[in-house]
Image: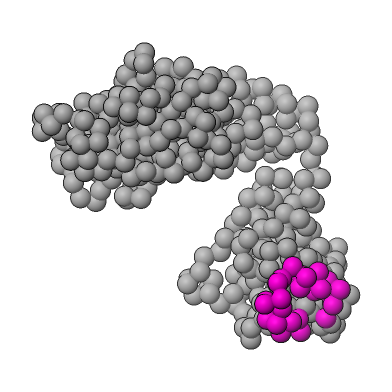
Amino acid sequence: MKRAVLLAIGDELLSGSRRDINCSWLASKFADAGWEVRKIEFLPDENAPIVQALDHWAGQTEIVVLSGGLGPTHDDKTRQALADFLSVPLIIDHKAYNKIAERYNPAEQEGIERSRSTQGAIPEGTTAVHNSKGSALGISFHHKQTVFFSFPGVPDEFQKMAEECVIPILQNEFAARRSFFVTGWAESLLKDHLASVFKRRDLHISILPSVNLIELALSGEESIVNEVASDILSLLPHDCLPSGCRSLPEAIYYEATKKNLSVSAAESCTGGMIGAALTGISGVSKVFYGSAVCYSNDAKKDLLAVPSFIIEKYGAVSSECAIVMAERAQKMFKTDIAISVTGIAGPDGATAEKPVGMVWFGLASSEHSCTFRKFFSGDRDRVRKRATAAALEYLWRSLKGEEIVCPYS
């Protein structure tokens, strides 16, 4: 297994005023490709600690990637530390910096030229890395059988440069790579369910969880990857998103388009998050007609015509309210299927019978209507995100014609 070390540079990271995004993102890319990330180090904006870290890891690992410290201000020390580590002077790579400068309009040229003496400088004998997102050159070189890359710490700049320079090296390590996106499973339960797959030692499998979606990234010989892919599909016949879909909104768009179906939503505790998730997909207006955000009881009654007696007798967070919300949304938007969500996200509004995290979902179509109840742990933000993800899952399964099984229904 090849090894990498990631160095995040910046006093702001050590003080806690900023969080590292770059190294954690890149570490996942190394893990997907079967590399071992030996260490992620956080270093101050000081020359000596940076040089010491570079000297320590040179020859001990195949790749070292540095994030941050290449800006034009006094506290950006990485560029000089690299030169001191190599015992060479800094030189201005005018040709490489001209390529950056030509992207900027005349009004911005003065500021760009003022930065040339710093952000255009690289240690003598190293290679400049073009930055298509910002104004600082990256730096790369070989030393003691280790490849070093140094990129600016601005996340979109770092990620773009890493995608262009580092990721291709990783992708050459394996003949085949394939990912499956699985919904409806807790990570621990999924790992048990796929125990036969995870016992294999002839390929690399990464588990990358997010809210109600787990990516299984396979890397290995093509024949082995294809074999294991077939095993995963047979063990999870209903839970893997369609090929090419990396999110539930994409899967909903794919399924609705394939079957020429339309969808809509009625939202209370999620406050428009379902609609926001779906409208993040370009072209989704072909299948998604809209979402009625009815947070207050009066809004539910006025906009969705939820009868007053339902709210008075059962409450807004109830099976009875959820099903009417879904049915009214389906009729109002004239869609084939509608999903509704009403719940208690907290921290207020709970009772003994209706605790924080209890959420009711309704599904309505011209053929039938049904409701489901789930309980989510966590704070308000977590409950809302998990409720949104569950609603998207139910909507996707409904579009597939699948019978939805909910443990709390």
Q: In which quarter of the view is residue 84 placed?
A: bottom right
Residue 38 seen in the current view: no
State which quarter of the image contains the C terminus: top left
Question: What's the residue at 64%, 54% (across, down)?
Answer: 27
Residue 401 seen in the current view: yes
Q: Which of 284 and 221 is in front in this view?
A: 284
Q: Which of 394 and 145 is in front in this view?
A: 394
Residue 259: image location, x then y, percent: 54, 19
Helix, strand or loop for the magenta stretch, by majority: helix
- Relative to 408, does residue 21 appear above or below in the rendering? below
Q: Nearer the viewer, residue 133 or 24?
A: 133
Question: What's the residue at 72%, 45% (across, down)?
Answer: 33
Position of 319 with respect to 389 (left or right) is left
Residue 278: image location, x then y, percent: 48, 38
- Relative to 371, does residue 188 appear above or below in the rendering? below
Position of 274 with respect to 227 (left or right) is left
Which residue occupies the extreme front position in the image?
A: 106
- Asked if residue 313 lies in the magenta stretch, the reply is no
Range drawn in magenta:
92-118
Position of 373 with respect to 28 (left or right) is left
Q: In which quarter of the view is residue 403 placed?
A: top left
